[in-house]
Image (spheres, rainbow, N blue to C red):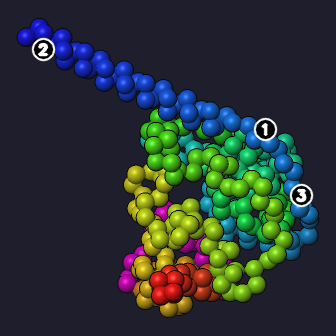
């Protein structure tokens, strides 16, 4: 019996040591990625105090989801806090106490938005630069102009804190966008040509949907969100939108009601924000999404 207990003790000891080793390696890998320093490239856009420009920038900040994380006043907030993820904080973008508005240059803001790199060269956390790197020059210009125009708000926020389970998922799964600087081509210049056709405009707008619905818009499990979040819907014609007409899409985006009678949960699907798109923007998005299944079908025939 003593021999058995001795063997069990060795096994338990090996298991505990192995777990601790995995935890240590996971921590070291994520700390290295989090503290990696990138080259600070400089990109500029025109910043204006014109009320029309600022209003367009406010619209971009809304439909692109900036206000969803940073708040309508851009003062930031604790976006996620739970034992699995840790604490994910959306930065105070204003020039108030606790904000970066006074210390960040326009170039710093552009770099953070497009490439997920802070003013010190280190990566931002959970900033979806892979969605924003394709924003064209005019929209980026108005967005920076709007950020610069907002009233200072004093809001001192705590630091980000990554829990071990989130770190482990990042290392093991490889698809969690903790550090989006790793997920974009940092040499991509600011696009200067605006989309023209409805399809092009819809594709351009749909980049803001990639974080949840994926680059192919087929939905599924959303990387890095709390476990109670449901899978994202398949937005292609192979999914639930296959029978939707344009009016159905408008109703879902504006009122949160689907043709089958479901009411969308705004916690997971921010239709109150996306519904502020103009009619033309929603039409463009619908045209693009409704083409995805058609394109796939055509590819299969060729």
Q: Residue at x 54, y 37 (%)?
A: 162
* Earlier-in-chain disc, 3 versus 1: 3
The span shown in magenta is: 260-279
Report how far apart the C-alphas of labels 3 and 1 lie in the structure.
Answer: 18 Å
Of all residues shown, which one is farthest toward the top?
2
Judged from the image, the secondary structure of the residue bearing numbered disc 2 is helix
Query: Dot 1 corresponds to which residue?
Result: 120
Give the foreground label among 2 and 3.
2
How far is disc 2 from disc 1 in space, using C-alphas? 56 Å
**Residue 246 in the image: x percent, y percent?**
54, 90
- The answer to which quarter of the image holds residue 274 is bottom right
Magenta segment's dominant SS is loop
The answer to whether 221 appears left or right of 299 in the picture is left
SS for callout 3: loop
Which residue is label 2 attached to? 4
Q: Residue at x 43, y 60 (%)?
A: 221
Q: Which quadrant of the figure has residue 16?
A: top left
Instruction: Kindly report the distance in space between the C-alpha atoms of the residues bearing marks 2 and 3.
Output: 70 Å
Question: Helix or strand or loop: what does disc 1 sit on?
Answer: loop
Q: Which quadrant of the rendered structure holds the N terminus?
A: top left
Disc with the residue nearer the chain's start (2 vs 1):
2
Q: Position of residue 249 (x, y in %)?
A: 52, 84
The residue positioned farthest toward the front in the image shown: 302
Residue 198 visible (yes or no): yes
**In the image, residue 15 above or below residue 89:** above
How far across and down, in percent of the image, does residue 77 sit? Answer: 62, 48
Residue 272 is labelled as none
Tell me if label 2 and label 1 are in contact, CB under 8 Å. Answer: no
Q: Is residue 270 part of the magenta span, yes or no?
A: yes
Which residue is under mark 3?
44
Give the mark, 2 or 3, whose residue is nearer the N terminus: 2
């Amino acid at each position: 019996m003593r021999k058995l207990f001795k063997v069990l003790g060795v096994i338990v000891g090996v298991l505990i040591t192995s777990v601790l080793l995995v935890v240590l390696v996971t921590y070291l890998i994520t700390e290295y990625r989090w503290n990696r320093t990138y080259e600070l490239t400089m990109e500029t856009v025109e910043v204006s105090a014109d009320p029309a420009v600022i209003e367009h920038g406010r619209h971009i900040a809304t439909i692109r989801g900036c206000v969803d994380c940073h708040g309508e006043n851009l003062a930031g907030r604790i976006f996620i806090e739970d034992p699995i993820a840790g604490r994910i904080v959306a930065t105070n973008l204003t020039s108030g106490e606790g904000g970066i508005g006074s210390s960040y240059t326009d170039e710093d803001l552009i770099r953070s938005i497009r490439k997920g790199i802070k003013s010190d060269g280190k990566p931002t956390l959970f900033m979806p630069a892979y969605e924003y790197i394709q924003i064209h020059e005019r929209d980026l210009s108005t967005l920076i102009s709007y950020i610069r125009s907002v009233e200072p708000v004093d809001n001192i926020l705590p630091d980000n804190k990554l829990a071990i389970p989130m770190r482990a998922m990042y290392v093991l799964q490889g698809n969690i966008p903790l550090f989006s600087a790793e997920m974009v081509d940092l040499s991509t210049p600011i696009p200067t040509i605006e989309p023209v056709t409805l399809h092009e405009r819809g594709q351009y707008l749909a980049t803001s949907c990639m974080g949840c619905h994926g680059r192919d818009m087929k939905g599924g499990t959303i990387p890095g969100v709390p476990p109670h979040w449901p899978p994202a819907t398949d937005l292609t014609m192979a999914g639930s939108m296959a029978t939707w007409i344009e009016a159905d899409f408008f109703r879902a985006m504006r009122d949160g009601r689907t043709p089958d009678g479901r009411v969308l949960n705004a916690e997971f699907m921010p239709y109150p924000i996306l519904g502020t798109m103009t009619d033309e923007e929603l039409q463009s998005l619908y045209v693009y999404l409704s083409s995805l299944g058609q394109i796939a079908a055509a590819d299969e025939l060729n």
